[in-house]
Amino acid sequence: MNPAPRPIHAMDADELRAVCARLRYEITQIGHWRRLVRARLDLTVARAVLPGRLGDGVAERGSTAPTVSHSVLVGIAQPAGTGLSVTDLPRLRSVEGSLADYEAEVRRALMIATDALVDRMSEDPAFRALHLPQASGEPRGALTEAAQCTVGQHA
């Protein structure tokens, strides 16, 4: 049994950076799964009704025949052993919806962790001193650590 995670408000900047990194990675994994599910949806719909034979009725118009036969195209579109049935569509749509909901939750968690990291860093006197404006109004440094936590948040 996993111990309960520490609350965000109790984490230091290093812990928050690690949380942000794990959440960004999870978002990339969700995106990959969503692409696979959407591709499966697209293939299922596209295979339900295959296009007609290419080249019929255009040869007499001076066009050449396709260099790929109809049977080759059908074999590519419907390879043996791949069961993509239109009866799978509701399940695939449900999975896509669940993944979209989960992605929204993870993105919210990343936003909360990023906000907490920015707060934690702004409370650190050493960090604030490093990033206070100089007399000329130019910042001494950039908020690179906080910005790194938000990279990928809007991907």
Image (cartoon, grey):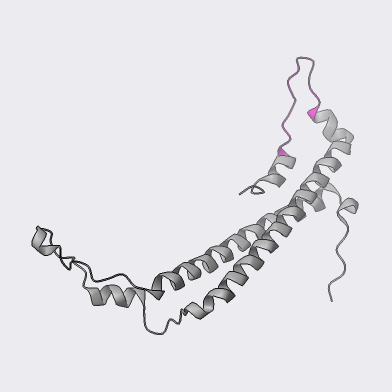
- Give the farthest residue toward the top: 136
Q: Quadrant of residue 130?
A: top right
Q: Does residue 77 sit above or below 7 in this rendering?
A: below
What's the residue at 27%, 71% (across, down)?
A: 52
Q: Main secondary structure of the magenta part?
A: loop
Instruction: Name above or below for residue 85 compared with residue 9.
Output: below
Residue sitting nearer the eye, 115 or 5: 115
Range shown magenta: 131-144
Rendered residue at 51%/80% (across/down): 87
Question: Was residue 4 drawn as part of the magenta stretch in this picture?
Answer: no
33 lies left or right of 45: right
Image point (79%, 29%), residue name: 131
- Which residue ends up furthest to the bottom in the rendered image? 81
In which quadrant of the rendered view does residue 97 lie? bottom right
Is 35 on the left or on the right of 1, as rendered? Answer: left
Pick the residue in front: 9 or 36.
36
Does the magenta-highlighted stretch encompass residue 141? yes
